[in-house]
Amino acid sequence: MLGWQAMNHADLDQLLILQEKDVRISKLRKELASLPEQRTRLLKQMEAIKQKALAAKQEVAGIEKSIRDVEAAVETKRAYIGKMKTLQSNTRKNEEYQRCIQEVEKTEAAIDSLETSELELMERLETGKTDMAQKIRRAQDAQRELEETLARFDRTAETDKELLNRLDAERAALAAAVPEDSLGEYERMTRSKGVPVIVPMDEKGHCGGCHMVITDNARMKVLSGHETVYCDSCHRILH
């Protein structure tokens, strides 16, 4: 910290300008670093929406198959009834005649049950198709939104990279004008604390970094502006 003790206000002013640039650079780098994670999260959300639409389609397909199976079963049983009635009309045996009547009645009851289940399936199918249509529209809307968002991410990344290159160049020029000792101490602090490391003292005597109240002695030194003052709590530079 000896380098700071010898720092004059010109050095501090230069470092404040440099720090402002570093704050912008840090923010840009964080934004760029967050884009892949945001992209991954959006893709996962899109996949979940697609899976819901697919599940709705499969539900409808399953109901339609069940209806076809019921219709096929009804046709088979009707054919069986026809066979029994033919046998009934041709038999001369009372026992066989009665058996045919019983088979026809039993099969007709089974057909009634199947037709009832078919009606229930038709109701489910109508509801399922409505749900499927909603989920498909949601997936289509979400896909368009996703494509627009990803395109915006790409534009943002390109713009941010160009701006970051410019800021890095400007930062290098500013750093070159700061005395080596002061610059070295500033960069050491930013590596351990991040920016900002030079913070204002508010009107109530709070540190602008950790928001703790600074001592009266330190407050007077900051106000006098004759020496570099560190916060006792977070060790940032106060101005």
Image (tube, grey):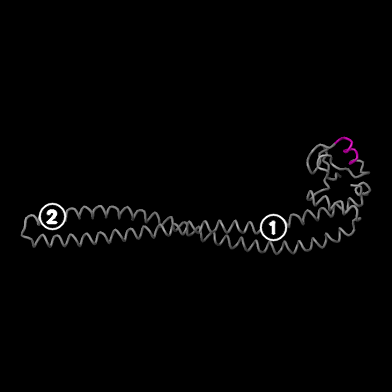
Drawn side of residue 109 relative to residue 158, left or right:
left
Drawn side of residue 34 relative to residue 187, left or right:
left
Q: Nearer the viewer, residue 231 or 119?
A: 231
Residue 50 percent across, percent down from the top left: 50, 59
Which disc is residue 230 wearing? none
- Crowding at mark 1 (Cα within 10 Å: few <14, some 14-19, many 20+): few
- Asked where in the image residue 145 lies, by quadrant, the reply is bottom right
Q: Secondary structure at mark 1?
A: helix
- Crowding at mark 2 (Cα within 10 Å: few <14, some 14-19, many 20+): some
Q: Residue furthest toward the left?
A: 92
Identity of the amino acid at label 2?
Answer: Ile
Specify start and end residues of the magenta stretch as a single range: 215-222
Q: Residue furthest toward the top?
A: 216
Q: Secondary structure at mark 2?
A: helix
Q: Earlier in the sequence, mark 1 or mark 2?
A: 1
Residue at the disc numbered 2: 101
Could you tell me which quadrant the C terminus lies in?
Answer: top right
- Asked where in the image residue 160 lies, by quadrant, the reply is bottom right
Residue 48 percent across, percent down from the top left: 52, 56
Q: Nearer the viewer, residue 83 or 145?
A: 83
Residue at point 35% right, 60% down?
A: 65
Residue at point 35% right, 53% down?
A: 123
Residue 209 percent across, percent down from the top left: 79, 44
Q: Is residue 6 above or below residue 212?
A: below
Residue at point 25% right, 59% down?
A: 74
State how far apart marks 1 and 2 are (Cα): 80 Å
